[in-house]
Image (cartoon, helix red, strand yellow):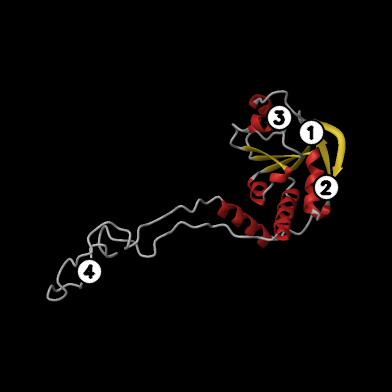
Amino acid sequence: MEVKVLDFNGKDTGRKVQLSDSVFAIEPNNHAVYLDVKQYLANQRQGTHKAKERAEVAGSTRKIKKQKGTGTARAGSAKNPLFKGGGTVFGPRPRSYSFKLNKNLKRLARKSAFSIKAKESNIIVLEDFNFETPSTKNFINVLKALELENKKSLFILGDTNKNVYLSSRNLKASNVVSSSELSTYAILNANNLVLLESSLEVIEDNLSK
């Protein structure tokens, strides 16, 4: 699959790059995508929720009324879950929601995500660029040149670029990551992927193993 290379002004450089069919043109595996996204979202959960159970609620344990002759159900302590202020039955406890996925499945999920974006023609290849200093204004100009200022976009760098990252950090709709930080969720959550030329080789090497 051939894609033309643009510069950061949105102009055609006259060059084209070949995207690997083994990464950008496979038959998407929806279940692998589902599992990888589920794991990503599960890992975002703190799992610090907690409700007090019967043994943890403050209050007396004395029997609040006699066993028989009241005409109502028998009752023990005021911590009974049936009473207001009583303990919670099987309430949430702190726990980790994370779970493991093998590397091959995660690679398949990312390749599937890339293939979905390629099929939708939502991939832009951009020649490498840098800013002398962090500048949100300069980054917005790049977005406007690519007609992405009103769309969710994911810029994928070949390596960490501090100035480009800091320039985008104030923009909610744009996200900048290096090739090593990619996730299936991030790929699918963006309307458009902007791949810098230096990232292509890294992505294809990582996902073609």
Q: CA distance from mark 1 to mark 4?
A: 72 Å
Crowd rating for badge 3 (residues with CA inside 10 Å; few <14, some 14–19, many 20+): some
Asked if the residue at tag 2 contacts the one at tag 4, i.e. Cβ–Cβ closer than 8 Å, the answer is no
Return the disc, 1 or 2, that comes first in the chain's sequence: 2
Please tell me how crowded label 2 is: few (under 14), some (14-19), or many (20+) other residues with Cα within 10 Å.
Answer: some
Asked whether disc 2 touches disc 3, contact meaning CB atoms under 8 Å apart, the reply is: no
> Label 4: which residue?
76
Cα distance, mark 1 to mark 2?
17 Å
Query: In the structure shown, which secondary structural element does the residue marked by tag 1 occupy?
Result: loop
Residue linked to disc 2 = 19
| Three-letter code, disc 1 | Asp
Q: Nearer the viewer, mark 3 or mark 1?
A: 1
* Three-letter residue code for mark 4: Gly
Task: Quickly name the residue at label 3.
Answer: 142
Instruction: Identify residue type, mark 3.
Output: Val
Q: Is residue 106 above or below residue 75?
A: above
Residue depth check, mark 4 versus mark 2: number of the one nearer the observer? 4
Which mark is nearer the camera, 1 or 2? 1
Residue 165, picture quadrant: top right
What's the residue type where badge 2 is placed?
Leu
Q: Which mark is residue 128?
A: 1
Reading the chain from its start, which is encountered first: label 1 or label 4?
A: 4
